[in-house]
């Protein structure tokens, strides 16, 4: 009985892989891609003059630094 089902099972697995590739490709190119393009077009942010970097003072007391590390 296993000899009959093994070729059918491998054929169905190959068909499933092809279907998955087709469905995921359609989802990407028809839904996700256009949504990303529209998001980039309509969600333009104006650059500000401020930076995200926060200036920190250098550490002088190494004992305090090592105890706060953990």
Image (tube, helix red, strand yellow):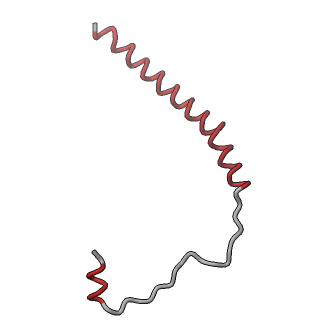
Q: Position of residue 66 (x, y in %)?
A: 27, 82
- Expressed as whole percent of the image width and height from the top left, the position of residue 3 reads 30, 10
- Relative to 64, is 53 above or below? above
Q: Residue at x 30, y 80 (%)?
A: 68
* Above or below for 20 versus 62: above
Q: Is residue 34 above or below residue 50?
A: above
Side of 20 relative to 40 (left or right): left
Q: Residue 7 location in percent, x, y?
A: 37, 14
Residue 46, x across and y down, in percent = 71, 68
Above or below: residue 47 compared with residue 60: above
Quick one: 27 or 52, which is closer to the camera? 52
Question: Horizontal placement of 34 versus 69: left or right?
Answer: right
- Indicate the quadrant containing the N terminus: top left, top right, bottom left or bottom right: top left
Name the residue rendered at 68%, 51% in the picture.
39
- Quarter of the view holding residue 9: top left
Q: Which residue is more in the foreground, 1 or 62?
A: 62
Q: In the shown orientation, is residue 21 left or right of residue 30?
A: left
Residue at the image point whose x is 67% and y is 78% from the top: 49
**Residue at 26% across, 81% down:** 67
């Amino acid at each position: 009985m296993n000899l009959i089902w093994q070729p059918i099972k491998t054929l169905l697995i190959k068909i499933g892989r092809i279907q998955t590739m087709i469905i995921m490709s359609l989802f990407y190119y028809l839904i996700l891609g256009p949504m990303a393009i529209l998001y980039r077009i309509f969600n333009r942010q104006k650059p500000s003059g401020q930076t995200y970097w926060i200036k920190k003072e250098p550490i002088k007391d190494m004992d305090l630094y090592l105890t706060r590390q953990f």
